[in-house]
Image: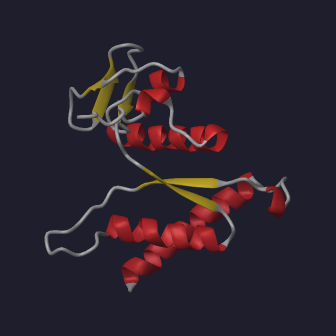
Amino acid sequence: MAKLAEMDLAIAGVLRMVDQACKDVSVDQRKVLFALGNGTFRTGFNLTSVHQTFLRRLQQKSMALGYKVALVDEYLTSTMCPTCVSKGKKSRLAKPSIRACACVECTRWIHRDGVGAHNIALIGKQYLKSRGRPEALARPPPKSS
């Protein structure tokens, strides 16, 4: 129960931050999209992970408030440079250390968790514009036999 209470506090903080950012916009004109990765994480005992529980609670509470939620396929989100993707280029990241990544194209260094989050946000932004993904993060078409 304590973990759920902590999650609810964190979620309330996120929703307050969104409300604060949108304070000048009327409630029915707000266009807020929560783009959440759809990856699954399991514990060794085949139980849902704390991460998965948090995402599910965030999704339920934000949808109850009328916000849109998009589950994003995490394909390539942790391996492509978000700076290059936002410019329409494909650039895979080198991972010289455990927590940091480097782009050989733009020479940006970024924390590995930031890479995935930034790319998921870019996918959400592109989804709002065209209901698609940025080309650099698109899955290749299936091979016909």
Q: Quadrant of residue 92?
A: top left
Residue 63 in the image: above or below residue 129:
below
Q: Check the image and name the residue furthest to the left.
A: 44
- Residue at horizontal 28%, vertical 33%? 143
> Residue 16 at what x, y percent from top left?
66, 64
* Count of numbered circles on the image: 0
Q: Quadrant of residue 137?
A: top left
Q: Nearer the viewer, residue 8 or 105?
A: 105
- Residue at horizontal 38%, vertical 71%? 53
> Residue 3 at what x, y percent from top left?
38, 78
Q: Check the image and name the residue furthest to the front.
A: 145
Which quarter of the figure is the C terminus placed in?
top left
Which quarter of the figure is the N terminus placed in?
bottom left
Give the left or right position of residue 132, taking residue 54 as reference. Answer: right
- Residue at horizontal 35%, vertical 32%? 140
Q: Quadrant of residue 101?
A: top left
Give the left or right position of residue 56, taking residue 127 as reference. Answer: left
Q: Check the image and name the residue furthest to the bottom.
A: 1
> Residue 31 at what x, y percent from top left?
72, 53
Q: Nearer the viewer, residue 81 or 98?
A: 81
Give the left or right position of residue 71, taking residue 143 as reference. Answer: right
How are the residues colored?
secondary structure
Residue 52 in the image: above or below residue 143:
below
